[in-house]
Image: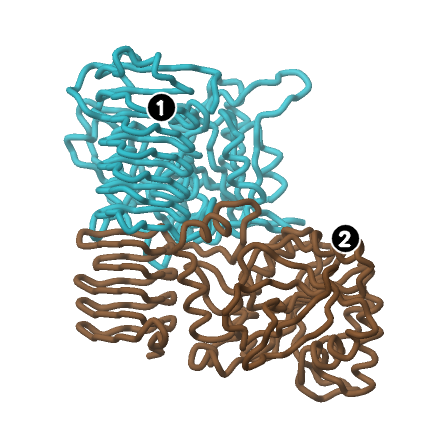
Amino acid sequence: MIKKKMIAMLLAGGQGSRLGVLTSEVAKPAVSFGGKYRIIDFPLSNCVNSGVDTVGVLTQYRPLQLNKHIGIGIPWDLDRRVGGVSVLPPYEKTGDTEWYTGTANAIYQNLEFMERYNPDYVLILSGDHIYKMDYEEMLSEHKKKGADVSIASMPVPWEEASRFGIVVTDENRRITAFQEKPKEPQSNLASMGIYIFNWPVLRDALITLKDVPECDFGKHIIPYCFEQQKKLYTYEFTGYWKDVGTLSSYWEANMELVELVPDFNLYEEYWKIYTETDSMLPEYMAPGSVACKCIIGGGSEIYGTVKHSVLGSNVIVGEGSVIEDSIVMAGAQIGKNVRIRKAIIAENVVIGDNTVLGEGQYAESKLDKRVYCAELVTVAADSVIPADVSVGLNTAIVGVTESADYPGGRLEDGGFIVKAGEKA
Amino acid sequence: MKALGMILAGGNNRRMRELSSRRAIAAMPMAGSFRAVDFTLSNMSNSGIGTVAVITQYSSRSLDEHLSSSKWWDFGRKQGGLYLLNPTITPENNDWYRGTADAISQNLNFLYKRHEPYVVIAPGDGIYKLDYNDVIDFHSDNDADITVVCKDFPEGADVSRFGVLQTDEKGRILEWEEKPVASPFRTVSTGIYVIRRRLLISLMEQCREMEWTDLVRDVIMRQKNVMNIMAYRLDSYWTNISTVKAYYDANMDFLKDDVRKHFFHEYPAIQTKVDDYAPAKYNTGAEVKGSLIANGVILNGEVTDSILFRKVFVGNGAVIRNSLIFKDSYVSDGAVLEYCIVEAGVTIPAGAVHKGTPEKPLIITE
């Protein structure tokens, strides 16, 4: 019989709606990060580096890019005869067919998958954070404490603690209380959404709470285990961990990578991050190019200037163009004499000659104030921006746009153009 | 499958000097992230050839390592796949491979067991893109016994390191000279052959019988008046890397837009073993012009008209011009390199100055 000590369930079905148009085509875990990676590469690589060789990836929202990326798991050596990576979408059942309605509901719908591996422990992960963590170490703490459930947490500044789910512990790190976004936090340990469960404990909780609508780990499963007097401990993590859930946090996390010695170092031999590579080519820097404080992905051809930016694979930057403080994802083609400042340009975007992005004054977004609240220009994947136009701050562009979409050659600050259904 | 592939990657070459003391020529680093053999392997894979034997001998460990997982070229398959044929001692034979024909005739068992009608034989040091199906079609259209892929060189080009030949107007090979000091012929053999498997078997059985060891001297030259040996002319980029200068120039060709477009950006792609290095990082002080920069490189200094392979580090104020820096090398602060080839894993100390010439690039091995 198959027996795996610990298997991982990686929740990758969320849209990540606060990333705006970046996730209009792809699920958040499939969003590019750091030039050649996608967000899901971090938890997946952590699994492999921690010796977890069986991973279920739960997908729901826009799974095409994720499916293609994960494939049969070759980049992570997760193409295995027993275990390896399995993509788990919602499926039709006799009777009560439903989408994944909550994090725990999604796991519940895959009970059979987990049972097949007969695990002792189940690791619950989410696919939207950037970090390097040894789950094996968390497991050995879990075992040492004799815990039923371990929740990874990390200290956050006290003044920010009220934005997080906070765990309160005794001196042995046993959890004594939970506070969800508390006004007066009793601790500064924020839950990271990473759990290790003893399999029987998880199984019992999932089955008992199966009829709870939108069953969620934080809201239902953990409180239930707590009520049942299960032993809940926290595993304190002190390394780099970044939630890239908003456009500005996503932009900042990318920009931190170009520092001389970044907090989050991708160049270490130990604990490598693996990914499905679009390109194994070197990049070409033309005689007239300038590159400074930036990361540039393989296969790119740079004829212009790139400063303080992160570029993905196979990006073309034309002569005379200047890109500053921006993220440009794989396959984007930037024309000649283009100026781009503080922009997030998603994959395969085409930008015409002489166009200017990110010049103007901050103005409130007319599209969605909750999502677009920084100076950033955000351009969705496969969009086209014509030549000779100017785009203001805090703007969003989706689809194949033409000069006619820019009255007077300008997209005003805070404005947006969404041409849904059109593809380059 | 129409054909199986045999890659002759066993050779050493004195004219590669120090560079080939560490590795087989086929394992020489190329164009920032490739090895020479990747071009032939990818051509085979892209031509739908599913079974490829790589014949190795000299310094084969470097090649074995590169080919240890065949999945990158799509050869990790149930049917067919990648075979490494090292010399082996058997009751019938206890010799090394003494030549190209000997290398194949020592592996006749491999040919007996296959069922593909054709064999594509190619050296491991050619830099080119070619759909071998075009050659096979040409071969059968012309009722050829052997087809040799050739490249016409311009008038006045130095052909002294090649086999050169003369054909009739239909392309049948009439004359052949090996590495002539001077020759009126401008058509160069690329060392790529197409032949029916059964014919190859019978020719190789004869070679074994007669102790003939060389494909060109003992097979093609001897048979050319009897057999229909045809030249297929390749009109796209081709070079091989049989001398230090040729190797250096072949790399530098990738700094040209049209060469890069042909190999990097036109379908189908050349594949190589995937690394897991982060993308290259340009720190303050980096000044990179007209150069190819591979993954994992960290730049703090000046790089002009050069190729930096994977995971090279360039220190503050370092200056690199017209050079090839192999992977994992560390160029310390203030070092100056001009027309150099720096071996893998070498540390250039701070402030060191090394200069070669375009005709004779300086090879730095430690």
Asked whether, in this view, residue A290 is left or right of residue B25, the answer is: left
Tell me the colour chain B is drawn in: brown
Q: Which chain is cyan?
A: A
**Mark 2 chain:** B
Is residue A238 visible to the viewer in this orientation of the structure? Answer: no
Is residue A302 visible to the viewer in this orientation of the structure? Answer: yes
Q: B326 or A214: which is nearer to us?
A: B326
Seen at 35% across and 37% down, the residue is A129
**Helix, strand or loop at mark 2:** loop
Seen at 65% across and 59% down, the residue is B233
Asked whether, in this view, residue B340 is left or right of residue A159, the answer is: right
Q: B220 or A160: which is nearer to us?
A: B220
- Residue bearing the label numbered 1: A385
B360 to A143, vertically: above or below: below
Q: A41 or B262: which is nearer to us?
A: B262
Q: Which amino acid, by three-letter code, is at mark 1?
A: Ile
**Mark 1 chain:** A
Q: Residues within 10 Å of mark 2 (few under 14, many from 20)?
A: few
Q: Quadrant of residue B37?
A: bottom right
- Residue bearing the label numbered 2: B1
Seen at 62% across and 53% down, the residue is B74
Q: Which amino acid, by three-letter code, is at mark 2?
A: Met
Horizontal and vertical percent position of residue B45: 64, 54
Q: A409 or A142: which is nearer to us?
A: A409
